[in-house]
Image (tube, rainbow, N blue to C red):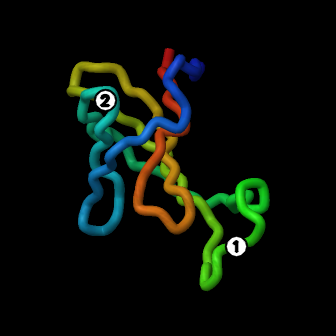
Amino acid sequence: MTAVQTEAPLAAAVDVRFTLDGTPLAVRYDGHIWAVAADPVRWFERESWWETQARVPVGAAVVDTTVWQVQVRINSSSPLRTMQLRQPAMTDHWILASIDDAT
């Protein structure tokens, strides 16, 4: 199985619905609600704050970006797609960084 990058716009704002324990349950993107269909994977990446700011904001203890990789589908018969979701440090919004189709 090979992953193929699609023409999805990078840095598209998305809404993410979470379970009570903080795991992604669904993603609203492109006018659809994509249900998470497999166990998501989370990791953290160091944000390059020095490229966008002169210094870390006062009082900021965390400069990490939260990243979730989720496999989603619109309905039970649609193909799986893999989304990479990013939450920049010190924000409450989510960005779709990439979306791939399995072929």
Name the residue nearer the viewer: 17 or 12: 12
Name the residue nearer the viewer: 87 or 35: 87
Task: Give the Cα distance between marks 1 and 2.
Answer: 38 Å
Rendered location of residue 92, percent (x, y): 41, 61
Crowding at label 2, few (<14), some or many (≥20) Cα neighbours within 10 Å?
Answer: many
User: On the picture, is 46 further left or further right than 1?
Assistant: right
* Displayed quadrant of residue 32: top left
User: On the picture, is 70 further left or further right than 63?
Assistant: left
Q: Indicate whether 75 appears above or below 38.
A: above
Crowding at label 1, few (<14), some or many (≥20) Cα neighbours within 10 Å?
Answer: few
Disc nearest the viewer among 1 and 2: 1
Q: Which mark is residue 56?
A: 1
Nearer-N-terminus badge (1/2): 1
Which residue does the image show at 29% across and 38% down from the upper left?
28
Amino acid under label 1? Answer: Val
Rendered location of residue 62, percent (x, y): 61, 75
SS type, badge 1 = loop
Q: Which mark is residue 73?
A: 2
SS type, badge 2 = strand
Amino acid under label 2? Answer: Arg
Which residue does the image show at 47% across and 44% down from the upper left?
95
Which residue does the image show at 55% across and 57% down from the upper left?
88
View extreme (bottom): residue: 59
Q: Which mark is residue 35?
A: none
View extreme (top): residue: 103
